Image (cartoon, grey):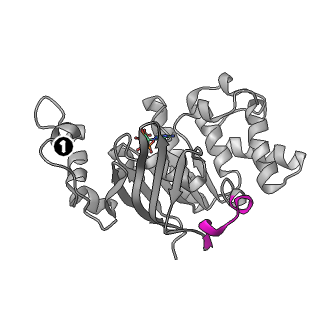
Amino acid sequence: MALFEIENLIVEFDTASGPFRAVDGVSLKVDEREVLAIVGESGSGKSVSMLAVMGLLPWTAKVSADKAVFDGKDLLSLDPAERRRIIGRDVAMIFQEPMASLNPCFTVGYQIEETLRFHLHMGRKERHARAIELLTLVGISDPEERLSSYPHQMSGGQCQRVMIAMAISCNPKLLIADEPTTALDVTIQKQILDLLMELQAENGMGMIMITHNMGVVAETADRVVVQYKGRKMEEADVLSLFENPKSNYTRALLAALPDNATGDRLPTISGMMEEGGFTPAVAQ
Ligand SMILES: Nc1ncnc2c1ncn2[C@@H]1O[C@H](COP(=O)(O)OP(=O)(O)OP(=O)(O)O)[C@@H](O)[C@H]1O
């Protein structure tokens, strides 16, 4: 049985110019200990799909699915309170902008400890000790002093480490990482990616890695879903995707990698689009 499975996910936004379908019938599943990458260019609905799963979309979003099951529980039939207990504890998410994801008004210690209080009902001393342990685990030096820092007193990489500490604080079974390294310096990106993959392996978490970066896919994923304009174009294990891409969109994405450039300029996806639309290589 899959750890997480969703079928025919549809997300529509009410906009001034009428309804806009950002996710159009996406189905995916993640097994325990598996890393699934969702890859696609900006605007392909990667974040919106996962925000829908987390219940974090604004009220203008209409979300529907034929099936949404996590760890044997039907998410569609859970009441909001039950859902909140699972989401954030058993399913955690890390976002692209660590600075913006942390609350600037509270110390990082308070924010980590609040997660432990809310989800695990830990007492003050226990929370404090666990927060130090978590900061140590994610590689923050002087963890005890760092607990009283505000986000603006830390670098982007350190803030992302704090976000990771918060996300893994309740030992989630599934971690959703939404472009976790995109906003960071190149030198820090690899460190954060390595940290995430280490924690994933050690804790045996399932992971959904949202990215537009094929390099990140190659380094992290077991299986890949390729998304374009809200639709799933292809799903494959990582080796097959790189060696034998089935959809013309995946081929276009791969051809746009710097290593595949044959002339002076990189091929662009939009340039390829003019030659004909993209077609899914999977049943939706
Ligand atoms: N609140 C909203 N109201 C209306 N449209 C929205 C809203 N949030 C997202 N969208 C639209 O939904 C589409 C999918 O956005 P989404 O953020 O999921 O893309 P993405 O693939 O994650 O890209 P990126 O990597 O840039 O975040 C985009 O066209 C976006 O403009």
Q: Residue at left 18%, top 43%?
A: 273
In the drawing, does residue 230 fall left or right of residue 123?
left
The reply to whether the residue tagged 1 has its Cβ within 8 angstroms of ligand 1 is no
Which residue is tagged 1? 273
Whether 181 is among the magenta residues is: no
Q: Locate residue 263, reporting x and y percent.
A: 10, 33
Image coordinates of residue 14 in percent, x first then y, are: 49, 44
Count residues near mark 1 (Cα–Cα under 10 Å), then give few for <14, some for 14-19, many for 20+: few
Query: Which element type, helix, strand or loop, lies under badge 1?
Result: helix
Quadrant assignment, res 60: top right
Front in this rendered view, residue 14 or 177: 14
User: In the image, which residues are magenta?
Assistant: 73-83
Q: Please state the horizontal and vertical placement of residue 137, each as a whole percent of the image.
A: 66, 46
Out of 168 and 194, give the one closest to the viewer. 168
Q: Does the magenta stretch include residue 76?
A: yes
Ligand 1 shown in quarter: top left
